[in-house]
Image (tube, helix red, strand yellow):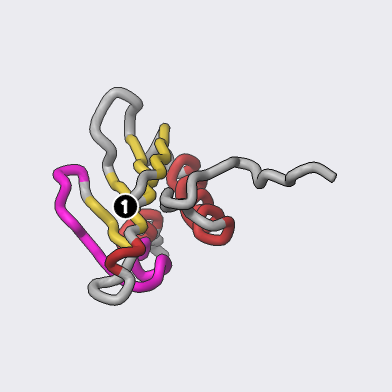
Amino acid sequence: MGVVTPFPATRESEVVFDRAELNRILDLYGRMVAAGHWRDYAIHFGREAASFACFRRTAERPEYRIEKRPALRQRQGQWALIGEGGVVLKRGHELGPVLAPVERKLMKLVEE
């Protein structure tokens, strides 16, 4: 019998998003693209954090970065929403409330 290697082969020391987390983030990304706010994204997996960056245009700084830092799980929370200037806009233990400020941009006022 052969050895089964999971795909993608990640190093054990690398922080990654699990399937449910990535689905939640990509769902928000798809809705923001459909609304015309975002055009591109980038994903980075590192030793200390996993990051999902959202861009208005490809050649600029990300408008938002969603970071997962498991080392902060017991303190401020492992999730952070970071703005364009590098300021932490929201931090928490769960992904949903951290994404709430971005989801508010999708709401539109409707007049009767």
- Judged from this view, the residue extending furthest toward the bottom is 74
Percent coordinates x, y for residue 35 in the rendering: 44, 44
Residue drawn at x 30%, y 76% as measured from the top left: 74
Percent coordinates x, y for residue 85 in the rendering: 14, 44
Percent coordinates x, y for residue 39 in the rendering: 41, 33
- Judged from this view, the residue extending furthest toward the front is 1
Residue drawn at x 25%, y 28% as measured from the top left: 60
- Residue count near mark 1 (Cα–Cα under 10 Å), binned few <14, some 14–19, many ≥20: few
User: Is 104 a magenta residue?
Assistant: no
Dot 1 corresponds to which residue?
A: 48
Is residue 79 placed above or below 40 in the rendered structure?
Answer: below
The span picked out in magenta is: 84-100
Q: Is residue 34 left or right of residue 93?
A: right
Q: Nearer the viewer, residue 76 or 89?
A: 76
Q: Is residue 108 left or right of residue 85?
A: right
Q: Is residue 86 left or right of residue 30?
A: left
